[in-house]
Image: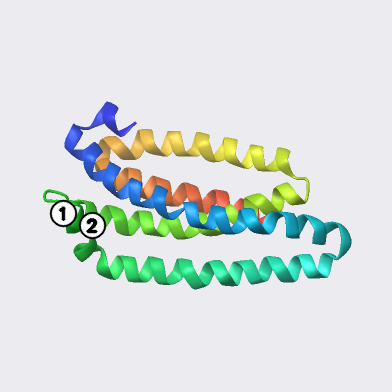
Amino acid sequence: MLSFFKPAYDVGIYGLAYKILETLVAYPSIYVGLLVPILSRMFISDREAFFRTTQKAVDMLSFVALPMLFGGAALAAKIIPLFGKGYDDAVPTIIILLGATSVIFFGTLYANVLIVVDRQKTLARIYFWGMLGNIAANLYAIPRWSYIGAAWTTLFTEVGVTIAMIVL
């Protein structure tokens, strides 16, 4: 959507920061993917163990996500130049997207928990409303604030979707 409203430079700045997000979110997917069979078995046989294991997964994800967020934000100005010259404007964008990335860590867990407890239809509705909200927010934010607006929209969408999953 950014490319419809803004020049290639803006798309490149956001693209670099978003590529970092895409790379980092693979790790919780791998970790949670390994937990799903265990959680499925526990949900059927021992609900208390299911909740304990889910809490341990939250703890483990926190152990990685929070240092990634705060360390990445503190080091962003040193990390971004490693990708080449001309990306200095990506620093605030990656800081915002690191917030979204850390939220996605938990969203990955809770999306899979909803699948384990047979709430796939509810999850699909959450994602659908998240998508509609994201499109609307981007239509407002991108023309005004370019890649910074797109980054904030990503963060707010991930927070909203993840909170909905946690509540359910």
Q: Are marks 2 and 1 in contact (CB under 8 Å)?
A: yes
User: Residue 33, how many percent across, how many down?
Assistant: 62, 53
Badge 2 marks a residue whose secondary structure is helix
- The amino acid on which the numbered mark 2 sits, given as a three-letter code, is Val
Report crowding for label 1: few under 14, some 14 to 19, many 20 or more residues within 10 A (C-alpha).
Answer: some
Badge 1 marks a residue whose secondary structure is loop
Query: Gap in Å between the C-alphas at discs 2 and 1?
Result: 6 Å
User: Residue 73, how many percent across, how many down?
Assistant: 31, 66
Quadrant of image for the N terminus? top left
Q: Is residue 168 visible?
A: no
- The amino acid on which the numbered mark 1 sits, given as a three-letter code, is Asp
* Residue furthest to the left: 85
Q: How is the image coloured?
A: rainbow
Q: Nearer the viewer, residue 80 or 163?
A: 80
Q: Is residue 121 visible?
A: yes
Q: Which residue is mark 2?
A: 91
- Left-right relation of 117 to 16: right
Q: Nearer the viewer, residue 84 or 152?
A: 84
Q: Tell me the number on the disc at residue 88.
A: 1
- Left-right relation of 88 to 21: left
Q: Nearer the viewer, residue 95 or 49?
A: 49
What's the residue at 46%, 66% (across, down)? 65
Residue 74's image quarter?
Answer: bottom left
